[in-house]
Image (cartoon, rainbow, N blue to C red):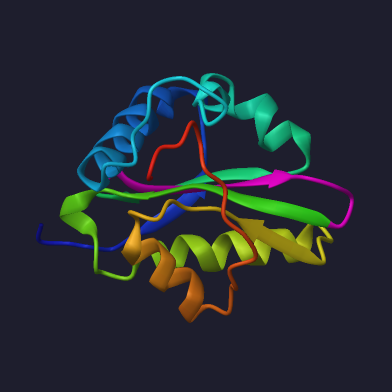
């Protein structure tokens, strides 16, 4: 990993396999990867219509043209958007890439006119929780899925 210059760009359809791999690779070590249910991953099957064409965005971060991080912005209402799919490849964590993706998503939300952002994460994703708290996000509730401690 000689050059760790991160380049952030919008998702392209040719990125689909890479984002699926990153999604799984980043979640599996946390124990937060769950089988189907209300938390399913169907949105990753059609990123363009779920995010980009629907009042949001989906961005990827690359190092030497390899996708190493990603994040999405999904419209919830005319004034509120949700931050989704924040992932950083385990080999690239603790290098500020998650912060850069979050900053870019917040900037995009402002450009799109959203006044409020929300997000969720699991109880097992402590580094993600710390990133969000450091950036002023506050916990507003907890939800349990099928009684699982995630």
In the rendered view of the protein, which quadrant contains the C terminus?
Answer: top left
Residue extending farthest to the front is: 147
Residue extending farthest to the left is: 2
Direction from residue 136 to residue 101 in the image, left or right: left
Q: Quadrant of residue 43?
A: top right
In the depicted view, which residue is nearer to us: 23 or 109? 23
Q: In this view, does 109 lie above or below 84?
A: below
Residue 61 seen in render = no
In the rendered view of the protein, which quadrant contains the N terminus?
Answer: bottom left
Question: At 10% across and 61% down in the image, what residue appears?
Answer: 2
Residue 118 image offset from top left, x and y in percent: 66, 59
Residue 130 image offset from top left, x and y in percent: 40, 72
Total count of labels? 0
Direction from residue 6 to residue 115 in the image, left or right: right
Question: At 33% across and 54% down in the image, what residue appears?
Answer: 124
Does the magenta-highlighted stretch encompass residue 73? yes
In the depicted view, which residue is nearer to us: 13 or 40? 40
Residue extending farthest to the right is: 78
Magenta span dominant secondary structure: strand
In the depicted view, which residue is nearer to us: 29 or 19? 29
Direction from residue 31 to residue 118 in the image, left or right: right
Question: At 62% across and 60% down in the image, what residue appears?
Answer: 141
Per the rendered image, the range of residues in magenta is 65-79
Q: Is residue 136 above or below residue 89?
A: below
Residue 69 seen in render = yes
Question: At 28% across and 44% down in the image, what residue appears?
Answer: 26
Residue 95 image offset from top left, x and y in percent: 25, 69
Residue 122 image offset from top left, x and y in percent: 43, 51
Does the magenta-highlighted stretch encompass residue 90? no
């Amino acid at each position: 990993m000689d050059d760790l210059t991160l380049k952030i760009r919008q998702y392209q359809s040719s990125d689909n396999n890479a984002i699926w791999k990153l999604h799984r690779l980043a979640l599996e070590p946390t124990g937060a990867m769950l089988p189907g249910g209300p938390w399913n991953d169907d949105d990753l099957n059609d990123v363009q219509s779920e995010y980009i064409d629907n009042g949001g965005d989906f961005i990827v971060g690359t190092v030497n043209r390899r996708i190493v991080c990603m994040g999405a912005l999904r419209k919830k209402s005319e004034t509120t958007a949700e931050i989704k799919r924040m992932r950083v490849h385990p080999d690239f964590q603790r290098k500020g890439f998650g912060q850069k993706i979050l900053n870019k998503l917040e900037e995009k939300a402002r450009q799109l006119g959203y006044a409020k952002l929300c997000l969720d994460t699991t109880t097992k994703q402590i580094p993600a929780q710390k990133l969000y708290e450091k950036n002023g996000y506050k916990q507003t509730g907890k939800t349990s899925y099928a009684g699982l401690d995630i």
